[in-house]
């Protein structure tokens, strides 16, 4: 039977433009879906770059203004893979045009922007999803299954870190291509909205609402040359962000993110300690889940390193044979597969814009807590 078509318009050709395009191309080969994703148009401001990107990934056409892309009647889904300062405006226009929207994280630069985006998609009634892809690393999805099966019991602790080291050099400029993450006007915040947002999304998904936080942030390099103005300007982002949190289920948490942990390139780790069992996951070993079960016979009790490659483990029956692992890119394939399957079943897959808004409420509270040096209650949406 011929597949139904979902015509996709991609905005941005950078890191995420590539990660998403790769997922759109592969998903139909590995997941049995009624729809096929058609790479209809790629949009970037530079015509040459848009053309080269479109040729490389197989997009049928290009646009150099996202407004034109959003207005095209032959586009069903808009994928926002451009920097954070573009998310709100594009999403509002795409929702008004009745398009389904996939948006990169963080949803907005702050929760005020995200609230507008949630209102827009809910008013328009369009399908929407945010690319918090780590939920769909099979080992992380498996942790979620274990929690839901009650295997950890009452949760006491949640611990997450996301460590990088790429901005230590004080001569690194801020702003412009590749360095927009250092420009607070574009990014909204530093590691809080960039790295911690991932940790917070996974944490809420695994362990429920975060109700209060106490944070500290630091900007280690206070001024940097700005690529767009050519002047040395104050750095407005947080280089490091650490916070304590209390979840609604009574568990206590620590979160840490930095771009100043020399030697760490992208080390995301999370751990949950429950009354009956614990889980630990590490992005550098992403196909493994570490699991400790106190119910094991005493003599044999210990941490198990579970290689998540078997057909009865999340997503793995769609890939290779047991024992052969998958990697980072596959989390995006899984997200697309779940998005499309959700459209087909009428049970939309998360995280949607409203779920992502909750992460922004936490990041806003973290930044406010650090600024005001006090505990903050997290707004619940
Ligand atoms: N889910 C994840 O793990 C993950 C990882 C990295 C980045 N992100 C998010 O993805 C988004 C993009 O990040 P990136 O790392 O791909 O950035 P990037 O700098 O690699 O790419 C950004 C792209 O957006 C384009 N762009 C900028 N302004 C535009 C405009 N007005 N119209 C059209 N195109 C425009 C740029 O030309 C570039 O192609 C950000 O929101 C970021 O936070 C998410």
Image: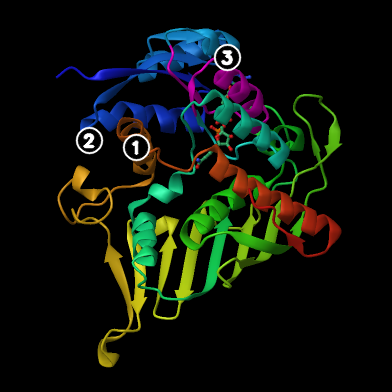
Marking on residue 333: 1
Q: Could you tell me if the residues under marks 1 and 3 are in contact, i.e. CB atoms within 8 Å? A: no
In the image, what residue occupies the spot 30% across and 85% down? 301
- Provide the residue span drawn in magenta: 75-101
- The residue depicted at 15 percent of the width and 50 percent of the height is 321
Q: Is residue 90 above or below residue 358?
A: above
Residue 12 visible here: yes
Identify which residue is drawn at 25% across, 89% down: 297
Q: Considering only vertical position in the picture, is 60 above or below 192?
A: above
The answer to whether the residues at label 1 and label 2 have Cβ atoms under 8 Å apart is yes
Q: Residues within 10 Å of mark 2 (few under 14, many from 20)?
A: some
**Mark 2 — residue?**
30
Q: State how the image is colored.
A: rainbow
Residue 135: say if magenta: no
- Residue 73: percent from left, percent from top: 46, 7
Which residue carries the number 3 mark? 66
Residue 99 is a magenta residue: yes
Q: Secondary structure at mark 1?
A: helix
* Distance between mark 1 and mark 3 Cα atoms: 24 Å
Asked whether, in this view, residue 45 is left or right of residue 365, the answer is left
């Amino acid at each position: 039977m011929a597949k139904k078509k979902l015509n996709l318009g991609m905005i941005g050709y950078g890191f995420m433009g590539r990660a998403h395009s790769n997922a759109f191309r592969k998903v139909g080969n590995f997941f049995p879906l009624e729809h096929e994703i058609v790479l209809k148009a790629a949009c970037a401001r530079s015509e040459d770059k848009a053309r080269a990107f479109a040729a490389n990934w197989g997009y049928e056409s290009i646009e150099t203004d996202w407004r034109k892309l959003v207005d095209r009647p032959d586009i069903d889904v808009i994928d926002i893979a451009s920097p954070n300062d573009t998310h709100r405006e594009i999403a509002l226009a795409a929702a008004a045009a009745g398009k389904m929207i996939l948006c990169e994280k963080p949803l907005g630069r702050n929760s005020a922007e995200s609230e507008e985006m949630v209102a827009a998609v809910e008013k328009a009634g369009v399908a929407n999803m945010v690319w918090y892809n780590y939920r769909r690393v099979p080992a992380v999805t498996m942790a979620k299954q274990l929690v839901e099966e009650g295997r950890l019991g009452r949760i006491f602790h949640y611990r997450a870190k996301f460590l990088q080291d790429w901005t230590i050099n004080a001569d690194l400029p801020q702003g412009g291509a590749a360095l927009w993450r250092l420009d607070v006007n574009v990014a909204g915040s530093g590691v809080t909205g960039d790295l911690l947002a991932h940790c917070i999304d996974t944490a809420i998904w695994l362990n429920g609402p975060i109700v209060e936080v106490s944070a500290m942030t630091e900007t280690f390099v206070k001024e940097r040359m700005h690529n767009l103005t050519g002047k040395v300007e104050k750095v407005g982002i947080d280089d490091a962000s650490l916070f304590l949190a209390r979840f609604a289920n009574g568990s206590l948490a620590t979160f840490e993110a930095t771009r100043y942990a020399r030697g760490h390139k992208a080390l995301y780790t999370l751990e949950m300690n429950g009354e009956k069992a614990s889980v630990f996951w590490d992005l550098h070993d992403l196909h493994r889940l570490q699991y400790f079960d106190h119910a094991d016979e005493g003599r044999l009790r210990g941490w198990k390193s579970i290689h998540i490659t078997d057909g009865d483990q999340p997503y793995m029956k769609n890939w290779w044979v047991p024992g052969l692992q998958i990697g980072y890119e596959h989390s995006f394939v899984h997200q697309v597969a779940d998005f499309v399957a959700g459209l087909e079943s009428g049970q939309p897959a998360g995280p949607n814009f409203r779920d992502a808004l909750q992460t922004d409420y936490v990041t806003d509270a973290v930044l406010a807590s650090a600024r005001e040096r006090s505990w903050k209650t997290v707004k619940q949406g």
